[in-house]
Image (cartoon, helix red, strand yellow):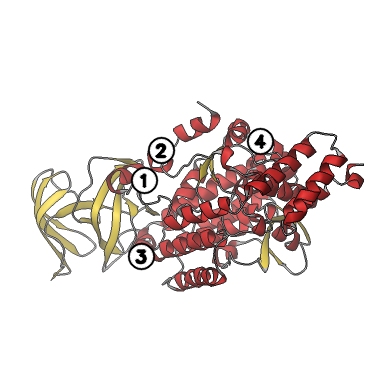
Amino acid sequence: MTPTERAIHRLPAHLRRYVVDQDPGAYTPRDHAVWRHILHKLTDHLAGKAHESYLAGLAATGIGLERIPSLDEMNVKLEGLGWSAVAVRGFIPPAVFTELQSLGVLAIAADIRSHEHIGYTPAPDIVHESAGHAPILADRRYAEYLKRCGEAGFRAIASVEDQAVFEAIRNLSVVKEDPAATPEQVQLAEERLHAASASRRYVSESTRASRLYWWTAEYGLVGDLDAPRIYGAGLLSSLGEATHCLTPAVRKLPLDLACADTEYDITRMQPQLFVARDFDHLFEVLEAFEATLAWRRGGDLGLEEALRARTVNHLVLEGGLELTGRVAERVAASRPVAPDLATALVRLEGPVLLSRGNRAEGRPWPGQALVAFGQAALPERGAFSLDLPSGLFLTGFRVGGHEVINLRVHQDGRPLDLPSWALLFLSGDLPSVAGGPADPEAWDHWFGDQNAFAEGEAEAEARARKAEALSPELAALYEEVRALRENGRPDPGRREALAARASRHAGEWLLQAELAELAPEVIA
């Protein structure tokens, strides 16, 4: 197997289906010229401005300046750093991106920005994902932070509205990179994103995690507040942002947990940035952020977060049993049950999947599940009657396993409207409530739509129009200019002949820039 095939083979099945072939042969000569232009400009500009590991990190992660790297070249180097890279198509679901990152896998967008958006694009592309994210992985402390940050994002609870925002961002990136998109279509895509963002009922844990990631891994500065250096991938991969970010026009703030509550706009350059003291500082802020998550806190806070999210999450009960489902109802206790827990009972809508140690146990239960909090025990089978300190009184018949029938529940003498047939669990505490299913692969096996993230028609059309926008004549010119430069001793006569042919494409500024590099005064 190739290095990239090995990286893909190691992935769980539910992540492999988001991976695509890079297909290096699909890049046009102009695509390679875009890469070369950006990388030369960036490396020249970033000398003395980027974190000290950046320039050396390019070569250390298999990234050259002259042409778009292959993932095989990158993976040969990344394996030595405990990382790997796989190709994906544009924006992928946040839970997929963060899970990959937590596993030490970079999701590299296979496409490259158009020459019209050479300075900045909101769409993920191979410039941003490889030349932005990969080089700083050469610093092992930062690489460790990136994995930990991925895990925090993966465990954070997302809301149903977060999905609408993701789809709007994905749509905007497609439209922005479509050469046939009209100004009206771009405006409509931007309005859709603003509307999706405005639809949020509250700021979810997942949104806060994405903000932390944005202001550190994507748009972070490090060092002295008055003379910081760049380490964020969004800054390192954008000619416009790399120039703009260190000017007085951008406010520099000391990095703290406030970054997780600071919004950002992907459609414009950022008006302020956060500066970390050093990479150890990143861990201090990350640990403070993790301490706010239901994943770490559990209890009432975790249940309320899952309840208002209306999404699939999982509860970790006392003893380590995990329940995946949608938290639909929380019944408050008349007195505390455990530290940070004053809940008598929680109801989960089916399907419900049981697991332990993030490994599923058996088939999903199609109905509802109830968790009653308090120290008590059910018989293995038969009738039961339980009086819990929380004020709950439960009677019913245990069929076997966790299945009960003829269930009746009273709280302080009042009957509760709950299903009479359900799974019933007892737990003295609730250590954790975390985002998504406890066993994502098993959940995907039972409920994942294998075509849910297939490339949309609009994306395929935009990609085709982008390829068609380069005529065979232009492609040949770019290729010949490259060959002339790589020959080592450019022939002035040959250059003049190419310049004469290129004059018919005066608006093709990138081609003119490539030719200008071969001018006699430059060659000399």
Residue 129 screen position, x and y as percent: 60, 48
Marks 1 and 2, how far apart at CA: 9 Å
Classify residue 217 as left or right of residue 478: left
User: Depth-wise, is mark 4 or mark 2 nearer the camera?
Assistant: 4
Looking at the rendered structure, the kind of residue marked 3 is Glu
Q: Residues within 10 Å of mark 1 (few under 14, many from 20)?
A: many
Please give the residue where the numbered disc 4 appears in the rendered image. Answer: 62
Marks 1 and 4, how far apart at CA: 32 Å
Marks 4 and 3, how far apart at CA: 46 Å
Classify residue 238 as left or right of residue 517: left
Q: Is residue 282 visible?
A: yes
User: Depth-wise, is mark 4 or mark 3 nearer the camera?
Assistant: 4
Q: Residues within 10 Å of mark 2 (few under 14, many from 20)?
A: few
User: Depth-wise, is mark 1 or mark 4 nearer the camera?
Assistant: 4
Please give the residue where the numbered disc 2 appears in the rendered image. Answer: 12
User: Depth-wise, is mark 1 or mark 3 nearer the camera?
Assistant: 1
Marks 4 and 2, how far apart at CA: 25 Å
Looking at the rendered structure, the kind of residue marked 2 is Pro
User: Are circles 1 and 2 on residues that touch, CB within 8 Å?
Assistant: yes
Q: Residue at x 62, y 50 (%)?
A: 471
Q: Is residue 444 above or below residue 459?
A: above
Q: Earlier in the sequence, mark 1 or mark 4?
A: 4
Looking at the rendered structure, the kind of residue marked 1 is Pro
